[in-house]
Image (spheres, rainbow, N blue to C red):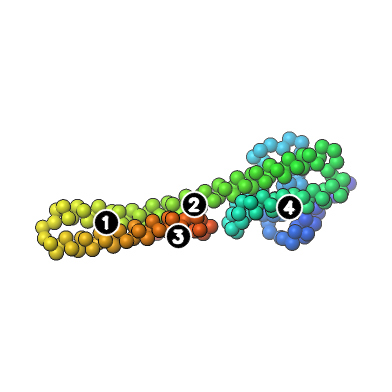
Amino acid sequence: MREPTTSFVDEVMERAATDDAETRAFLGELAEMAERVDVQEGQFPHAQAFGVARFLTGTSSDELVREVLRLGHRLEEFLAQRGRLEGDARDRFHAVVDESAAQAVRAHETAARSRRDDWLSFYVHDMRNPLNTLVNALWILRHADGVGQAQRVCDMAERAVKRLEGTIREVRELEQKASEVPPRKPGDTH
């Protein structure tokens, strides 16, 4: 009788000194896929979840690839020691590890793009109010009757410009902020 895959996963998890659910599911998926002959792209949901989880913890894509390969090598050792990677099985396992790494990185990059898009959306929303203020200020100046009103409108426009400058400065620093979740505006459903 063959030893269950979960025992291999448990041993690799113990050796890797980790116990997170994403790693456990990812290793289980690798072990299961290693025994299949018809592995196809798109069949690695746990590798994808692993990539997203690592993005959320601040792991870079190159660190992610190293981690996937390290876990794959550890699992390969255990499977080989127990005679479960004989003949073509080892080549299939390497293909499984390669594909899982590709899908984990793709999911990591998708999560990074999504986070960046969320920040850009936040900044665009933040720029609308000062721009509206400037448009209104121009309208008031065009239709103003007195000098006192023009000064108040210019002050209002100056504050709007300063808010825009601050937001533009933050957009320039977007790459550093992209690992954080952007703040939500009141009434935001996204």
Q: Earlier in the sequence, mark 2 or mark 4?
A: 4
- Report whether 38 appears left or right of 110: right
Q: CA distance from mark 2 to mark 4?
A: 29 Å
Q: CA distance from mark 2 to mark 1?
A: 27 Å
- Report whether 2 appears left or right of 179: right
Residue 70, disc: 4
User: Is residue 107 visible in this depiction of the protein?
Assistant: yes
Q: Earlier in the sequence, mark 3 or mark 4?
A: 4
Q: Secondary structure at mark 4?
A: helix
Q: Residue at x 38, y 53 (%)?
A: 125
Can you identify the residue that label 3 sits on?
A: 183
Q: Earlier in the sequence, mark 1 or mark 4?
A: 4
> Crowding near pointer 1: few (<14 within 10 Å), some, many (20+)?
some
- Hey, which quadrant is residue 161 in on the image? bottom left
Looking at the picture, tell me which residue is in the foreground, 66 or 136: 66
Q: CA distance from mark 3 to mark 1?
A: 22 Å
Mark 2 is on which residue type?
Arg
- Report whether 125 appears left or right of 157: right
Can you identify the residue that label 1 sits on?
A: 133
Q: Position of residue 72 (x, y in %)?
A: 74, 49
Residue 71, disc: none
User: How many numbered marks are there?
Assistant: 4
Q: Residue at x 59, y 49 (%)?
A: 108
Q: Can you say whether 145 is above or below 80 in the image?
A: below
- Hey, which quadrant is residue 103 in on the image? top right
Q: Position of residue 106 (x, y in %)?
A: 60, 45
Q: Position of residue 169 (x, y in %)?
A: 40, 58
Can you identify the residue that label 2 sits on?
A: 116
Q: Earlier in the sequence, mark 3 or mark 2?
A: 2
> Crowding near pointer 4: few (<14 within 10 Å), some, many (20+)?
some
Q: CA distance from mark 1 to mark 4?
A: 55 Å
Q: Earlier in the sequence, mark 2 or mark 1?
A: 2
